[in-house]
Image (cartoon, rainbow, N blue to C red):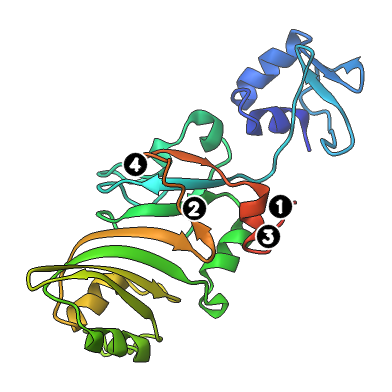
């Protein structure tokens, strides 16, 4: 990897800014001052110092965000704020993107990465990764609704969903609270599933993906890196 690309990717400035930095003699590779931006280095085998401090190269980034409502799951948008807009510059330099999507008005667990293979492993329909949501809906949920979801419900376009798990947390004539686990991600699926039961979702929050739970200490819009143990829940080890 070219030295200027390495430094730029690690957030030390644009390629132009990094070249100016190199001219000052601030970069040392394996004990030798390097000023040529085209110099190739192997960050796994060589030691790169900036002003005497080691530059630790990372290829991938894995973040957990507590997505707020009103923000869209996209990398950029002309009208709305995106989840990437909520990140700091030190994360944006990795060119990350959301893993899957949450509707604009939906809150909760959203993963953000720049690892396309990780994204595929979680989002591929063939992987059947379970996703669990907490929701508030209009009307009273019943055990009959639970049985319908367990068999698969028919959406407004005729699609029959795969079996899900509906847990009624609270129910009365006006409103109900529920936890719903599904293994697919059709457009507005949770809302459309509830509509098939004559219920309307008034609040929706994703609380888990697979065995990974949302860190409830994260305020809306906050994020943190996944731990190695959390990545291991998906049998994933970054390069």
Q: Is mark 1 on a helix, strand or loop?
A: loop
User: Relative to residue 185, is residue 130 drawn left or right?
Assistant: right
Which residue is nearer to you in this view: 144 or 232?
A: 144
Q: Look at 34% across and 89% down and name the residue there.
A: 152
- Asked if residue 26 is positioned above or below residue 18 in the image, the reply reads above
User: Relative to residue 180, is residue 227 drawn left or right?
Assistant: right
Q: Look at 23% across and 89% down and name the residue there.
A: 144
Query: Mark 4 or mark 1, which is nearer the start of the sequence?
Result: 4
Which residue is nearer to you in this view: 88 or 213?
A: 213
| The N terminus - image quarter | top right
Query: Mark 2 or mark 4, which is nearer the start of the sequence?
Result: 2
Labels 1 and 4 touching (C-beta < 8 A): no
Q: Is mark 3 on a helix, strand or loop?
A: loop
Which residue lies under the disc numbered 2?
Answer: 111
Crowd tier of the residue under label 3, counting other residues whose Cα lies within 10 Å: few below 14, some 14–19, many 20 or above? some
Crowd tier of the residue under label 4, counting other residues whose Cα lies within 10 Å: few below 14, some 14–19, many 20 or above? some
Whole-angstrom CA distance, mark 4 to mark 2, is 14 Å
User: Relative to residue 123, is residue 25 drawn left or right?
Assistant: right
Labels 4 and 2 touching (C-beta < 8 A): no
Which residue is nearer to you in this view: 169 or 3?
A: 169
Which residue lies under the disc numbered 3?
Answer: 236
Question: Could you tell me if residue 148 is visible in this image?
Answer: yes
- x, y percent for residue 42: 85, 37
Labels 1 and 3 touching (C-beta < 8 A): yes
Whole-angstrom CA distance, mark 1 to mark 2, is 15 Å
Whole-angstrom CA distance, mark 4 to mark 3, is 26 Å
């Amino acid at each position: 990897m070219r030295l200027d690309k390495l430094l730029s990717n690690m957030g030390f400035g644009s390629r132009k800014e990094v070249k100016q930095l190199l001219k000052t003699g601030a970069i040392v590779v394996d004990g030798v001052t390097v000023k040529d931006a085209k110099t190739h280095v192997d960050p796994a085998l060589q030691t790169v110092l900036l002003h005497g401090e080691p530059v630790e190269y990372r290829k991938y980034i894995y973040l957990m965000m507590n997505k707020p409502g009103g923000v869209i799951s996209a990398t950029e948008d002309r009208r709305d704020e995106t989840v990437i807009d909520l990140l700091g510059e030190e994360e944006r330099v990795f060119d990350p993107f959301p893993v899957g999507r949450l509707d604009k008005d939906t809150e909760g667990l959203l993963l953000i990465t720049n690892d396309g293979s990780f994204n595929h492993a979680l989002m591929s329909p063939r992987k059947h990764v379970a996703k669990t949501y907490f929701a508030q809906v209009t009307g009273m949920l019943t055990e009959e609704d639970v049985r319908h979801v367990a068999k698969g419900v028919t959406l407004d376009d005729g699609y029959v969903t795969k079996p899900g798990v509906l847990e009624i947390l609270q129910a009365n004539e006006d409103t109900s609270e529920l936890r719903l686990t599904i293994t697919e991600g059709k457009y507005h699926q949770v809302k459309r599933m509830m509509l098939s039961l004559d219920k309307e979702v008034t609040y929706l929050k994703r609380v888990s993906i697979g065995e990974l739970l949302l860190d409830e200490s994260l305020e809306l819009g906050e994020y943190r890196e996944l731990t190695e143990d959390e990545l291991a829940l998906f049998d994933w080890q970054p390069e």
